[in-house]
Image: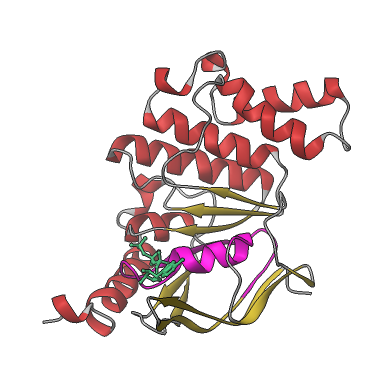
Amino acid sequence: MTHLSLEQVGISFTRAGRTTEVLRDVDLKIDKGEFVSLIGHSGCGKSTVLNIVAGLLKASTGGVLLDGKEVNSPGPERAVVFQNHSLLPWLTVRENVALAVDKVLRSKKSRAERREWIEHNLALVNMTHAAEKRPHEISGGMKQRVGIARALAMEPKVLLMDEPFGALDALTRAHLQDQLMEIHLRLKNTVIMITHDVDEAVLLSDRIVMMTNGPSATIGEVLTVPLARPRKRLELVEDPTYTHARAEVLEFLYARHAKPAIAA
Ligand SMILES: Nc1ncnc2c1ncn2[C@@H]1O[C@H](COP(=O)(O)OP(=O)(O)OP(=O)(O)O)[C@@H](O)[C@H]1O
């Protein structure tokens, strides 16, 4: 059975009496453990797709199935990491992770097991040393790492990431991409990640889902990235499979589906 399935997903929004169809017939099947990126021009509807999978928005047509069950509300089996960390500022790093763990795993793990699980997830993103700090005392990259730890600590079936590294400088971003690849290799979570960064999409993904421009946006093409794992960014720079995949995505975005305003 397909793990996660988007079936004929469509959505329209009505604003001031005008209805716009943002998504139409979005069909996608994702296997357990797959890392899928969503890429497309700004405003095409990537976050809307993710929010429908998260259960934060309801599709106007079609729907989403996770392990055969229809998704119609948010749930801890679909954890979301946003671009701008959403940590509670008055809690420490450890308390932020603990809040999610205590809420979601109270009935599954004893108090001692939960304490251990919190430490395990902080260690997974190398944040043990800063566990007592509050969000304003740590860098943007560290906050994103805590956000990822908090999401992973909920033991989600699917990790949904909306431009998780978009606000970070290039070096921090590369570091977190490497960490995410390592975590994914170890835990084999199913991931859907939105990105605007073509290299990030190729480096991290098993498949890259490329969306057409809206309104009525849909999936234009899906590119499989047949690169073995673990992947090493330095070794990939000159790998023909890597450069081919990169060129395919660039051609989709800037030739076949260029934004009308910037089309040559
Ligand atoms: N709740 C809403 N009500 C009305 N319109 C909405 C709503 N949510 C999204 N939209 C519209 O849907 C379209 C797609 O938005 P969305 O944020 O999904 O795009 P995106 O591809 O994620 O953009 P970006 O890359 O800039 O983040 C936009 O035109 C947006 O204005």
**Residue sticking out furthest to the front:** 17
Residue with the most extreme left position: 264
Residue 40: quarter of image: bottom left
Corner quadrant of residue 27:
bottom right
Display colour scheme: secondary structure
**Depth order, front residue of 72/27:** 72
- Image height check: is 39 above or below 252? above
Horizontally, residue 32 falls left or right of residue 246, namely right
Residue 111 or residue 4, whichever sits in front = 111
**Span of residues in magenta:** 29-56
Picture coordinates of residue 234, whole percent (x, y): 34, 45
The residue that appears at 52% across and 32% down in the rendered structure is: 87
Q: Is residue 236 magenta?
A: no
Residue sitting at 35 percent across and 35 percent down? 172
Q: Is residue 151 above or below residue 112?
A: below
Q: Is residue 206 visible?
A: no
Name the image quarter holding the N terminus.
Answer: bottom right
- Specify whether residue 42 is painted magenta: yes
The residue shown at (79%, 70%) is: 69
Q: Indicate left or right for 23 with 153 as reference.
A: left
Residue 223, position as x, y percentages in the image = 46, 74
Q: How many marks?
A: 0
Does 8 sit above or below residue 167? below
The image position of residue 116, as x and y in percent, is 76, 22
Question: Which quadrant does ligand 1 occupy?
Answer: bottom left
From the image, which quarter does the C terminus lie in? bottom left
